[in-house]
Amino acid sequence: ETAVFQTPNYHVTQVGNEVSFNCKQTLGHDTMYWYKQDSKKLLKIMFSYNNKQLIVNETVPRRFSPQSSDKAHLNLRIKSVEPEDSAVYLCASSLGLGEYEQYFGPGTRLTVL
Amino acid sequence: GQQVQQSPASLVLQEGENAELQCNFSTSLNSMQWFYQRPEGSLVSLFYNPSGTKQSGRLTSTTVIKERRSSLHISSSQITDSGTYLCAMEQRPSGSWQLIFGSGTQLTVMP
């Protein structure tokens, strides 16, 4: 049963373009996350959004920005994509930060040409 | 250097064998989390374990903070256990929150 939805599944774009990925959770959770998984399968937290507080991983480039309309939605915008942005982007949600189980979406695979 | 180191990088087992996956961390942490990534890519949370031992079915997680290590034990492995196991170190610096992942252990269980 999928409770964290991501669109699109795949996206191919050119360097310099702007892209936006959507994430919606139907679990009533208060916390949402965006992760990046690179070609070597290394997973990195990018953002967490908990009770309207945004926590940013300091290593995330400024061209990335999260956008939230309500606690069920956390979208990811990349202003001007670069080749190293090619990766799978995973969205997740949980009841709160830390000790709560995270539920992941299926991911969006981005390819930057 | 890498703050979270997982070992082994890969492991092949015969069905029914046990597995012990290790995670060592080089700095202080709030807790250790374990995740499982299926071969097709979907991720699930396994454990949140700040210290001590937690068990869920055939999986057991043990975290020893003062020794800076956490382990995941899989007993009586099954083919469906194949996939990648990831540990992640949770830190809460100055009211913030971070999760730092290891590079994973790829487990293959053969019939």
Image: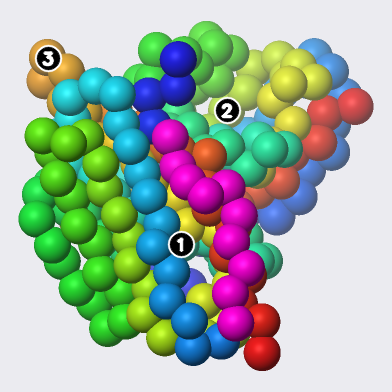
Mark 1 and mark 2, same subunit?
no
What type is the residue that disc 1 sits on? Tyr
Magenta run includes residue B13: yes
What type is the residue that disc 3 sits on? Ser
Residue B36, labelled with which disc? 1
Q: Position of residue B102 (x, y in %)?
A: 45, 38
Label 1–label 2 contact, CB within 8 A: no
Total labels: the figure holds 3
Quarter of the image that includes the C terminus of chain A: top right
Left or right: where A61 falls relative to B50: right
According to the image, label 3 marks what residue?
B94
Q: Nearer the viewer, residue A35 or A77?
A: A35
Task: Name the chain letter of the residue that bears numbered label 3.
Answer: B
Mark 1 and mark 3, same subunit?
yes
Q: Position of residue A106 (x, y in %)?
A: 58, 60
Task: Name the chain letter of the residue that bears numbered label 2.
Answer: A
Q: Residues within 10 Å of mark 3 (few under 14, many from 20)?
A: few
Residue A77, labelled with which disc? 2
Left or right: where B93 falls relative to B44: left
Magenta run includes residue B65: no
What type is the residue that disc 2 sits on? Arg
Label 2–label 3 contact, CB within 8 A: no
Left or right: where B42 falls relative to A16: left
State which region is magenta.
B5-14
Q: SS of the residue at dot 1?
A: strand
State the residue at coordinates (18%, 50%): B63
